[in-house]
Image: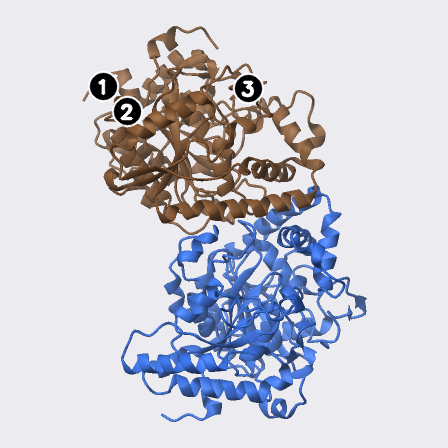
Chain colours: A blue, B brown
């Protein structure tokens, strides 16, 4: 089997792995093809900010030998992968998008990275993030912005923006990300790929500063649900360092390798376009309604339901204040004027917030959760749009206004995702055609706590159905124009 | 088989259930024997504050018929049980130990109670608690104090004090409890019975006000580890209401019915008498050291280890402040002067605490956790004393001083238990002979998160070994003197 470079980089992760194991393609060729794609396309979008090509080539040759010797293949056997630059990579510069770490080279992999490597994944490079990964527009003082692959002048979302762009542009089949208020989902939607925020505790996170929190959840970005599930199966492996995270409940990580066959015609779906009234542009509402119309043609039922999560964004802000104080109280003294204004604004507002407000927000959180899960008595899934507006210019930190309404701060335009974080529920961003501007459009698919396997299985079935409807098909960037685009 | 009343009330839960199923004893006789025991002994100790005898008799007759008809027996088939008065019982007065609820009769069982009933458990009554279950001495303005079964002038601990006393005095084989800072463990130690605080999330708690917390954990009190495991298997069942608690991770509750055979001679035990320096009386230290000497004679190893949890009590106080604000901010306006001073003191101190202090406490909590679990690289279990002092007179809210050192507040004398809550680890209170005053002495047996089954299995093995050593044997109250004691 001889595949061109273009064909090699188009391969999905599950498919590429099987071809490597079967000796049909060489991991060395695959890595070279991805490196070539990065060299061609990355200048236009600036998704990958640090590369590890020489090490990747060595590792690819090692995998090739293992294959020849019929050694047991790892789950990511020979697959090129990009790592979000908030996650430490041994020997490879890790900046957190911050000038303060411009030359930092970790001595140890973060546990998710170690799991990726020990499964045979080949790290090609690090993907761009907002400074310290806070904000939903991928821009920082060290590397500048990552451009949207469908129009490099526009935002690719964030904070896992570089990962979303690297995957949609075929630089890599897989990338890691993490999600606080939408950081896996927003960039997935803006890049037309799959991003998955699992139930907190599924992916052990030894770096969390507090024993219990829904922030932040590490997860996969891929071009298909099955590929995302493969990377998830690796990221959530229980190992020596998992016990550093007390939320790591016992679970068989291998179960994500086999998704159930779900009859899409039997799926009962609850639909809401704005979670009961959060900020969503008219244009996105129209697109979502059209898509729901199409989807209702092939699922069991697709009912518009009453949900009211309008107070969730305020809860998120308070919980965010609380977690930021835990996260940053040791560092705050050293921040200068240039440091991420999103972080400074949240932190400073936190210091003047009485703890009773935080406590009340926690109670509201519980009330919202208990109301929302009532929906699952009658429905398998809840769906809503993933982002409130079409991609905006990355030159503004966040969209300044939506349909004439001013946007208050860096979180106010993304209540669609942050409200789901408040609930703690597992949620998948699924590509769903293009919006009215011709840019990628995605929906959030939301399931009950701990039903990750069911959610992934159902999303996989939906994805297959979407592939048969022109308006629902996953969008693919125009590579030729990207290759000619001026350097970002 | 004809058993006397005395023999019937002595039966353990697992044994009694089997005898009922085999038709060897009648559930009606068992219930009558327990009622008789309550009538004889309860006046001296005041453990059970509300009874449900007529309903219990009806239910016992129903179970008897089910047995005759060979219907599938429930896990608690015909077993008399007492419910902590903080847990709602449908049709049976539930006061939370508070005059404000003196006549409150819930219309619905709390979920743990519903699970007990649907497993065939027969609720005989409600057990006494401090007001709103806050405090480790069981006394309240509504029912007064519960006396220690080994000396009714002394405290039985708390907050599940009535449950501990009801079980040790053979009024019931099983009782429910709950544990915030030691509320299952302290009364278990003071009554010479087993109390079990499972990993948070094992027992679904639909009444918690916040989505994630180690407070408060519901659990079993029994006279043996196996009986506690039986009740746990019922309390932790996943049902319709479990999903109201987002911490309810997937788990097979049935696994607690079969404990593994553990070779006590292979157990590696880490030992600390004071968690690195928390307040523990000299007398308790001496008793603990003697017991460790004995235990080291039959386990694999029993090593004194360096642990430093001295900052954990302060963390607990801050987390407690935080949770109290969530729990009580709606009610605080209505409190009068007589309301539980423990709650008022914690709540009022909370309002003046900056949120940065709480956030920092959370970070310290994580650091303590990560250091502590390092012990489990070399040891299966950690043990330490359960309570810092021998039972004290219940007429003081808490021991005024320990070895001449003043005790600062209602939490300062129980850092041995509250510090383990801060870590979140599963912990079992195991009876271990008597202290220097001839009163029950118990140890805490602590395992890693989610290793509940292993912990129960190991504790079961230890318990069997203890039964062979005179100084380690579970103490039993002097029933004759209790029956003659003056009414408490």
Give the Cα separation between the discs numbered 2 and 3: 39 Å
Q: Is mark 1 on a helix, strand or loop?
A: loop
Mark 2 highlights which residue? B11
What residue appears at the point 60 percent right and 26 percent down from the top-left corner? Answer: B409
Q: Which of marks 2 and 3 is nearer the N terminus?
A: 2
Mark in front: 1 vs 3: 3
Horizontally, residue A302 falls left or right of residue A274, namely left
- Pointer 3 chain: B
Badge 3: residue crowd in 10 Å (few <14, some 14–19, many ≥20): few
Relative to A404, residue A325 above or below: above
Q: Earlier in the sequence, mark 2 or mark 1?
A: 1
Could you say which is closer to the camera, residue A90 or residue A271? A90
Residue A320 picture quarter: bottom right
The numbered mark at residue B3 is: 1
Q: Are marks 1 and 3 on the same chain?
A: yes
Horizontally, residue A370 falls left or right of residue B61, namely right
Mark in front: 2 vs 1: 2
Residue A169 picture quarter: bottom right
Badge 1: residue crowd in 10 Å (few <14, some 14–19, many ≥20): few
Mark 3 highlights which residue? B401
Residue A427 place in picture, x, y as percent: 54, 63
């Amino acid at each position: 089997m001889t595949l061109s470079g273009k064909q090699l980089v188009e391969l999905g992760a599950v498919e590429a792995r099987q071809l490597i194991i079967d000796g049909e393609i060489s991991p060395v060729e695959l890595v070279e093809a991805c490196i070539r794609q990065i060299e061609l396309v990355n200048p236009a979008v600036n998704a990958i900010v640090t590369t590890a090509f020489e090490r990747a080539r060595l590792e690819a040759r090692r995998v090739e030998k293992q294959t020849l010797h019929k050694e047991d293949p790892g789950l990511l056997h020979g697959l090129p992968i990009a790592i979000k630059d908030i996650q430490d990579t041994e020997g490879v510069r890790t900046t957190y998008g911050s000038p303060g770490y411009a030359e930092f080279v970790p001595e140890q992999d973060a546990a998710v990275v170690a799991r990726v490597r020990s499964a045979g994944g080949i790290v090609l490079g690090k993907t761009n993030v907002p400074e310290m990964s806070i904000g939903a527009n991928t821009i920082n003082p060290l590397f500048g912005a990552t451009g949207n692959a469908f129009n490099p002048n526009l935002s690719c979302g964030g904070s896992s923006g570089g990962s979303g762009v690297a995957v949609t542009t075929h630089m890599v089949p897989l990338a890691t990300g993490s999600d606080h208020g939408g950081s896996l989902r927003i960039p997935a939607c803006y890049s037309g790929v799959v991003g998955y925020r699992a139930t907190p505790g599924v992916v052990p996170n030894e770096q969390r500063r507090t024993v219990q929190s829904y922030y932040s959840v590490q997860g996969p970005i891929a071009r298909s649900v099955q590929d995302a599930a493969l990377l998830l199966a690796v990221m959530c492996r229980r190992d020596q360092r998992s016990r550093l995270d007390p939320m790591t409940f016992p679970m068989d990580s291998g179960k994500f390798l086999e998704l159930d066959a779900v009859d899409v015609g039997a799926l009962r779906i609850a639909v809401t376009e704005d979670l009961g009234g959060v900020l969503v542009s008219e244009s996105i509402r129209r697109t979502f309604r059209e898509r729901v119309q199409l989807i209702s043609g092939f699922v069991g039922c697709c009912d518009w339901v009453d949900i009211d999560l309008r107070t969730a964004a305020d809860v998120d802000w308070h919980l965010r204040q609380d977690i930021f104080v835990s996260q940053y109280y040791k560092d705050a003294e050293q921040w200068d004027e240039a440091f991420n204004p999103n972080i400074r604004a949240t932190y400073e507002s936190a210091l003047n917030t009485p703890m009773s407000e935080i406590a009340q927000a926690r109670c509201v959180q519980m009330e919202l959760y208990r109301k929302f899960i009532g929906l699952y008595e009658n429905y398998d899934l809840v769906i809503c749009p993933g982002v409130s507006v079409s991609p905006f210019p990355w030159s503004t930190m966040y969209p300044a206004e939506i349909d004439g309404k001013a946007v208050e701060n860096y979180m106010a335009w993304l209540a669609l995702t942050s409200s789901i974080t408040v609930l703690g529920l597992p949620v998948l961003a699924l590509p769903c055609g293009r919006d009215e501007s011709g840019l990628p459009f995605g929906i959030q698919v939301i399931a009950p706590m701990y039903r990750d396997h069911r959610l992934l299985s159902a999303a996989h079935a939906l994805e297959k159905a979407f592939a048969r409807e022109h308006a629902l098909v996953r969008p693919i960037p125009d590579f030729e124009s990207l290759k000619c685009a001026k350097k970002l």
